[in-house]
Image (cartoon, helix red, strand yellow):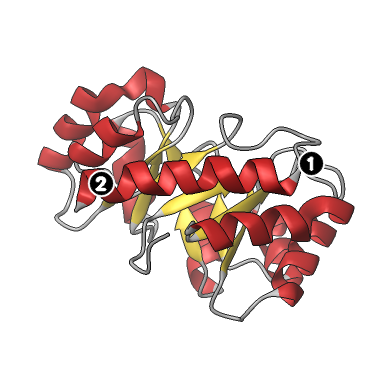
Amino acid sequence: MTSRPTGLVAILRGVTPGEAVAVAEAIFAAGFDAVEVPYNSPDPLESIRRIRAAGPAERRVGAGTVLTPDDVRRAADAGASLIVSPNTRPDVVAETVRLGLESYPGAATPTEAFVALDAGARAVKLFPSSAVGIDGMRAWASVLPAGTALVPVGGVDAGNLGDWAHAGAAGAGIGTSLYRPGDPPDVVGTRAAELVRIWSAATA
């Protein structure tokens, strides 16, 4: 457990509305800052609505695999405060910023990262982070504006999370190593607590 922000985002791909609240509550209790329900999950907007309604307003609840400005608006209507994409589309970033939401556009190159920042993003999702690599993230950080939050996603797990943290990542999005469809909340909560422990130790 930690009271400090971790920057860790749980990616609940495949979660159903019926299990979304219990799984999210276990993850938040373990110390994660945010949960994300990707659009390619069953009835994602309903899951977002239920998670949002179940907790305090300041909790960070996001929509993932957001591909269009209309997706942004529908997620906002459901209560999402984070918009996470696998790609860099300036119109998606701009709509996210216009609505006062946090934008996490996916980028695989420095050029894409600069496009995202020019559109108004303040954070960049390194995706897939296994392709960018830790050395790649360090190189990006040397040329991107100071304060740009770099968040690796795709291949981050308990085995390498500490390395990403030591290298300066602002957080991480963690998917299948934390949650797979049907995993019980207590099991997910145990995994989440271990990830928070690793992150906290690496950033202490």
Furthest residue toward left? 142
Report whether 69 appears left or right of 93.
Answer: right
Residue 115 in sight from this viewpoint:
no
Q: Amino acid at mark 2?
A: Ala
Report whether 25 appears left or right of 150.
Answer: right
**Residue 22 pos. (x, y %):** 76, 58
**Residue 7 pos. (x, y %):** 39, 55
- Graded by Cα atoms within 10 Å as few (under 14), some (14 to 19) or many (20 or more), the crowding at tag 1 reads some
Quarter containing the N terminus = bottom left
Q: On residue 186, which mark appears? A: none
Circle 2 residue: 201
> Which residue: 34% across, 41% down?
198
> Which residue: 66% across, 40% down?
187
Report whether 67 appears left or right of 174.
Answer: right
**Residue 154 pos. (x, y %):** 48, 28
Q: Nearer the viewer, residue 75 or 60?
A: 60
Question: From mark 2 to mark 1, how far is it between C-alphas?
Answer: 32 Å
Circle 1 residue: 41
Residue 135 appears in which quarter of the rendering?
top left
Secondary structure of the residue carrying tag 2 is: helix
Q: Amino acid at mark 1?
A: Ser
